[in-house]
Image: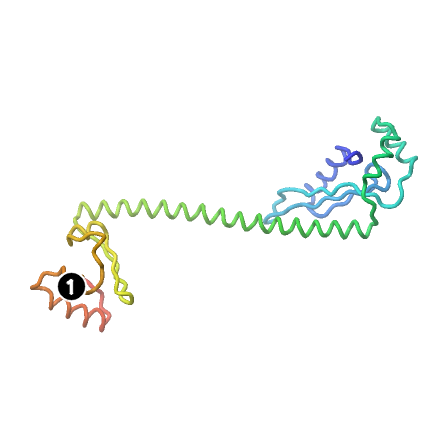
């Protein structure tokens, strides 16, 4: 605006750097021009400022306008004309407005914190995924070389998942419906009764680990 000089802006920003809190400057240019600034904090880190434009408290003094116009090398009539664009206020109204902006700044800070947390989580998640993919690669290589496989059986839902190597050993593909009934079908007939009894009695009833 025509009243907040660069010096005034620098001054209020320097004050915020030293102590980031709601800050008000009055009489920094014209005697009854008042400006304010609110810092935006995220995790107590000072990220930005919201500067509040000039407002007029009371009536403009032509003598004060003329003195300031001479100081900044501007025609006092032009400067006086521009005062009509300033919002008239009282000290109470100005502080009410300032505290409202402070609330907005706090909400911006909270949103920024949420974004930081989400960003950190996504970054961590990507690292975990990368680590798991690396481990999965080495596990698959180990199983391929050793010609062994791995599986997971969900007893409650009667569904099991197996590694590619185990699928190759069993001679099945992704279309094969992996449940208990079909598992029995791929067991050699001479071992079928033994494996069925072992699973039903020792694994399900006695809760022993499956190790056959």
Q: How is the image coloured?
A: rainbow
Q: Quadrant of the C terminus?
A: bottom left
Residue furthest to the right in view is: 63
Residue situated in front as seen by the camera: 18 or 159:
159
**Residue 17 to residue 193: above or below:** above
Residue furthest to the front in view is: 175
For this view, does 47 lie left or right of residue 119?
Answer: right
For this view, does 47 lie left or right of residue 123?
Answer: right
Residue shown at 70%/49% (left/top)?
Answer: 101
Badge 1, how many Cα within 10 Å: few under 14, some, many 20+?
some
Residue furthest to the left in view is: 190
Q: Count the marks.
A: 1
For this view, does 32 lie left or right of residue 10?
Answer: right
Q: Quadrant of the N terminus?
A: top right
Q: Residue 133: horizontal and vertical position, in percent?
A: 32, 46
The image quadrant that residue 176 belongs to is bottom left
Q: Residue 92: horizontal and vertical position, in percent?
A: 81, 52
Q: Residue 113: horizontal and vertical position, in percent?
A: 56, 49
For this view, does 148 lie left or right of residue 37?
Answer: left
Residue shown at 20%/64% (left/top)?
Answer: 180
Q: Find numbered disc 1 in the image and state the secondary structure of the residue it sits on.
A: helix
Residue furthest to the top in view is: 73
Pointer 1: what residue?
184
Q: Residue 107: horizontal and vertical position, in percent?
A: 63, 51
**Residue 180 to residue 75: above or below:** below
The image quadrant that residue 8 belongs to is top right
């Amino acid at each position: 605006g025509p009243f907040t000089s660069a010096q005034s802006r620098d001054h209020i920003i320097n004050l915020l750097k030293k102590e980031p809190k709601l800050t008000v400057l009055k009489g920094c240019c014209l005697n009854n021009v008042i400006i304010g600034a609110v810092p935006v904090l995220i995790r107590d880190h000072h990220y930005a400022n919201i500067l509040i434009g000039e407002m007029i408290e009371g009536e403009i003094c032509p003598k004060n306008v003329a003195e300031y116009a001479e100081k900044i090398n501007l025609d006092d009539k032009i400067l006086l004309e521009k005062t009509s664009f300033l919002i008239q206020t009282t000290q109470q109204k100005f502080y009410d407005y300032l505290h409202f902006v402070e609330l907005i700044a706090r909400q911006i800070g909270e949103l920024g914190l949420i974004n930081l947390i989400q960003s950190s989580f996504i970054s961590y998640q990507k690292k975990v995924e990368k680590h798991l993919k690396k481990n999965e690669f080495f596990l698959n290589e180990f199983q391929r070389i050793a010609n062994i496989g791995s599986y997971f059986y969900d007893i409650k839902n009667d569904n099991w998942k197996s590694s590619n190597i185990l699928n190759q050993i069993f001679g099945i593909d992704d279309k094969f419906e992996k449940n208990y009934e079909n598992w029995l079908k791929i067991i050699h007939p001479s071992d079928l009764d033994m494996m069925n009894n072992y699973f039903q009695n020792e694994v399900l009833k006695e809760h022993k680990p499956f190790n056959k």
